[in-house]
Image (tube, rainbow, N blue to C red):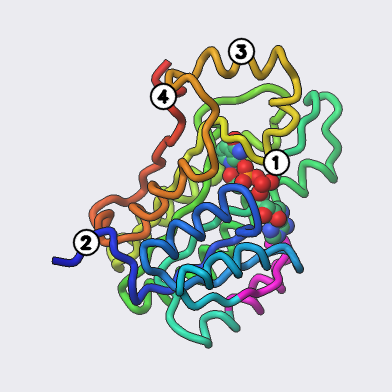
Amino acid sequence: MTSPFDLHGRRAVVTGAGRGMGQAIALGLAGAGADLVLLGRPGAQSCTRDQVADLGRAVEVVDLDVSDHEAVERAAAEVNSNGQVDVLVNNAGIIDRHDSVDVSRQSWNRVMDINLNGLFFLCQAFGRPMAERGHGKIVNIASLLSFQGGVRVASYAASKHGVAGVTKALANEWGPRGVQVNAIAPGYIATDNTTALRADPDRSRSILERIPAGRWGEASDIAGAAVFLSSAAADYVNGHVLAVDGGWLAR
Ligand SMILES: NC(=O)c1ccc[n+]([C@@H]2O[C@H](COP(=O)([O-])OP(=O)(O)OC[C@H]3O[C@@H](n4cnc5c(N)ncnc54)[C@H](O)[C@@H]3O)[C@@H](O)[C@H]2O)c1
């Protein structure tokens, strides 16, 4: 009997897959049988590309700055014309830590352009053919700061609250057309995104003390949830933001 988590025959797009959670998600999807398209910064995807190929899956790399609207349109047109996209994982994201009184308009806009605007227009560019076809899965990477305000990260919290909102809005519109749109809210994961937090002994200790799992997450902790939400096992899951946080939100 075929596993409901099996992704053989599926073609999945992952943004920002060169390192961190995007890389772990790409390898998780490939391990479940999916072929991969890696969208991200020029030169950053080669290590992940080689690891996906080592798993025996087809893999394409397309250079893309997700905040460049016209480039998103071009990249999506190219990828869609090369074959059907069954899964989109919007992982690319940045954080910019400042006291709110010091946030510049440039910093605010950059976070929004990458984390929210890029994500929405990627959903649109890949979701349109999914909805026309009547089949597809979109997984957006949200955050605990889709639920909480955080400290010194107003732009990030605003963008990730927006990711949760967009996820639910698209789930409502595209659910009737066979497309499930969900999100994963990772907890505190040891990647480049959290280097500054882990380098601050007080912040690092206070975060760790609050995590019921008793440890920071690893990028690979997110892969199983991504496989689940990309697969037939999640056909009746729609508009959900799934926390993978070692229990943080339960405190
Ligand atoms: N690490 C955490 O604790 C944590 C927690 C919650 C959510 N997140 C989210 O998880 C996602 C992955 O982050 P990570 O922790 O793996 O950090 P990371 O910094 O290691 O990875 C971010 C990825 O996004 C890519 N990226 C950034 N800007 C881009 C752009 N303009 N165009 C294309 N690609 C771009 C980077 O090249 C990189 O591959 C992000 O959306 C982040 O906000 C991280």
Q: In the rendered view, does 154 fall on the left or right side of 120?
A: right
Q: Residues within 10 Å of mark 4 (few under 14, many from 20)?
A: some
Label 4 near label 1: C-beta < 8 Å? no
Give the CA distance from mark 3 to mark 4. 15 Å
Q: Which residues are magenta?
A: 61-76
Name the mark nearer the viewer: 2 or 3. 2
What's the residue type where badge 4 is placed? Gly
Q: Residue at x 13, y 66 (%)?
A: 1
Quarter of the figure with the C terminus: top left
What residue sits right under mark 3 in the picture? 206
Q: Residues within 10 Å of mark 3 (few under 14, many from 20)?
A: few
Label 3 SS: helix
Q: Residue 41: horizontal and vertical position, in percent?
A: 73, 63
Q: Residue furthest front?
A: 54
Q: Residue 250: horizontal and vertical position, in percent?
A: 39, 20
Residue 128 can be seen, yes or no: no
Q: Residue 192 has which mark?
A: 1
